[in-house]
Amino acid sequence: MSLGLRIKTLRKSKGLTQKKLSEMVDVSRIYIQSLESNRRLPSMKLLKRLAEALDVDVVDLVQDPYRDSTGRLMLEEVLNGREPVEIWYRSRKLSRSEVQLVQKLVEAALSDWDRKDG
């Protein structure tokens, strides 16, 4: 997940508008929009203010916990993780039943591909 998408997802999960977040961190709403669309990168000072406003550590803001050292996203860890995680798609939080449906669809697709390869 990109930094911009992480900022947007965290902002929405906190029920904040771009305007409210911009006021909390003392930048314009347009600047927040630019960050969320990955057109701009925040300074270290702004990263710290964003992390405080979004109630996360700076490391959690910039580092994707579900990627390994090669940059691969471990989908099974996201879907089956021991720690509760919110899964968002197109700026909407998925319910537990929707996440389970996604998992079943992925498993069905993989089984189908394995059958075709075998």
Image (cartoon, grey):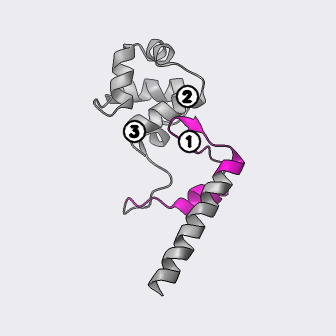
Q: CA distance from mark 3 to mark 1?
A: 15 Å
Q: Is residue 86 magenta?
A: yes
In the rendered image, the residue lying farthest to the right is 97
The answer to which of 105 and 10 lies nearer the viewer is 105
Q: Which residues are magenta?
A: 71-98
The location of residue 11, given as percent across then percent down, is 52, 27
Estimate the x, y position of residue 47 in percent, counting from the top left. Answer: 40, 29
- Residue 33, compared with residue 101, is above or below; it is above
- The amino acid marked with disc number 3 is Leu
Name the amino acid, label 2. Lys
Tag 2 residue: 12
| Residue to which mark 1 is pinned | 88
Mark nearer the viewer, 3 or 2: 2
N-terminal-most mark, 3 or 2: 3
Could you say whether the residue bearing mark 3 is in a helix, strand or loop?
helix
Q: Which mark is residue 3?
A: 3
**Gap between marks 2 and 1, in whole Å?**
10 Å
Question: Which residue corresponds to the image point at 46% horizontal and 13% vertical from the top-left?
Answer: 19
Q: Residues within 10 Å of mark 1 (few under 14, many from 20)?
A: some
Q: Position of residue 93 (x, y in %)?
A: 61, 38
Image position of 22 with respect to 101: above or below:
above
Seen in the picture, residue 88 relative to 15 is either above or below; the reply is below
> Which residue lies at the image location 59% right of the left edge and 69% below the top edge?
108
Q: Quadrant of residue 105?
A: bottom right
- Judged left or right of residue 108, residue 24 is left
Which quadrant of the figure has residue 37? top left
